[in-house]
């Protein structure tokens, strides 16, 4: 089992690395060249800035039973059929059964933004979100190790 992190803009890189170290698991942080990231004990893969380069690298290299941390529904949708465990930054486990709905909602929001009608506010990240993520990741590791 390896932990993969879609590290471009991921708010829980530090927490994921701490859990990987605690559980003696390898962790790979995938990012584009524009992101400056240095973490001791983690393998860091830097890819070009082209659209979806990080996603396609993770899809190509993640294996059955690995854990991928991402907030990208599209990436999760490509990984779930490979039996890769996908978790978001808030500790939400992606499921095959709900993926079509998530992708449809993402598509609708993108259309609204394109037409200037969607103005969602980004809320400040709370400590409770990090705690939920840490608990969820540790639970997954406990179940699958």
Image (cartoon, helix red, strand yellow):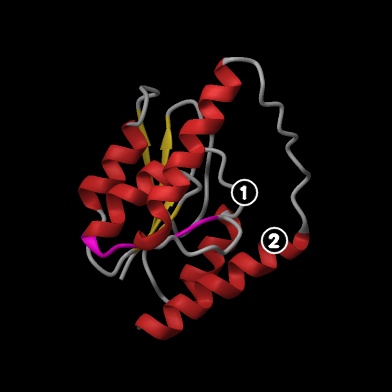
Q: Nearer the viewer, mark 1 or mark 2?
A: 2
Q: Image point 24% across, 58% down: which residue? A: 81
Q: Is residue 23 visible?
A: no
Kindly report the distance in space between the C-alpha atoms of the residues bearing marks 1 and 2: 10 Å
Secondary structure found at label 2 = helix
Q: Which mark is residue 11?
A: 1
Q: Residues within 10 Å of mark 1 (few under 14, many from 20)?
A: some
Secondary structure found at label 1 = loop
Indicate whether residue 106 is drawn in magenta: no
Indicate whether residue 83 is drawn in magenta: yes
Q: Image point 26% across, 55% down: which residue? A: 62
Position of residue 135 relative to residue 89, above or below, is: below
Q: Is residue 15 visible?
A: yes
Q: Earlier in the sequence, mark 1 or mark 2?
A: 1
Question: In the figure, is residue 64 to the left or right of 114?
Answer: left
Q: Position of residue 35 (x, y in %)?
A: 52, 32
Q: Position of residue 2 (x, y in %)?
A: 33, 65
Q: Image point 26% across, 65% down: which residue? A: 83
52 and 105: which one is in front?
A: 105
Q: Quadrant of the C terminus?
A: bottom left
Q: Position of residue 11 (x, y in %)?
A: 62, 49
55 and 47: which one is in front?
A: 55
Question: In the figure, is residue 65 to the left or right of 29?
Answer: left
Question: In the figure, is residue 89 to the left or right of 124?
Answer: left
Q: Marks 2 and 1: in contact by CB < 8 Å?
A: yes
Q: Which residues are magenta?
A: 82-88
Q: Quadrant of the N terminus?
A: bottom left
Q: Position of residue 20 (x, y in %)?
A: 46, 69
Q: Which mark is residue 129?
A: 2
Image quadrant assignment for residue 92: bottom right
């Amino acid at each position: 089992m390896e932990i993969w992190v879609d590290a471009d803009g991921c708010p829980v890189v530090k927490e994921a690395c701490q859990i990987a170290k605690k559980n003696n698991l390898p962790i790979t942080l995938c990012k584009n060249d524009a992101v400056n990231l240095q973490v001791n004990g983690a393998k860091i893969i830097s890819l070009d800035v082209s659209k979806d380069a990080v996603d396609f690298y993770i899809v190509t290299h993640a294996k059955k039973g690995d854990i991928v941390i991402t907030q990208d529904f599209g990436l999760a949708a490509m990984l779930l059929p490979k039996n890769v465990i996908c978790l978001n930054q808030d500790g939400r486990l992606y499921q095959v059964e709900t993926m079509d709905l998530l992708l449809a909602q993402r598509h609708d929001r993108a259309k609204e933004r394109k037409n200037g009608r969607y103005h969602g506010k980004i809320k400040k990240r709370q400590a409770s979100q990090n705690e939920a993520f840490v608990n969820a990741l540790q639970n997954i590791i406990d179940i699958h190790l």
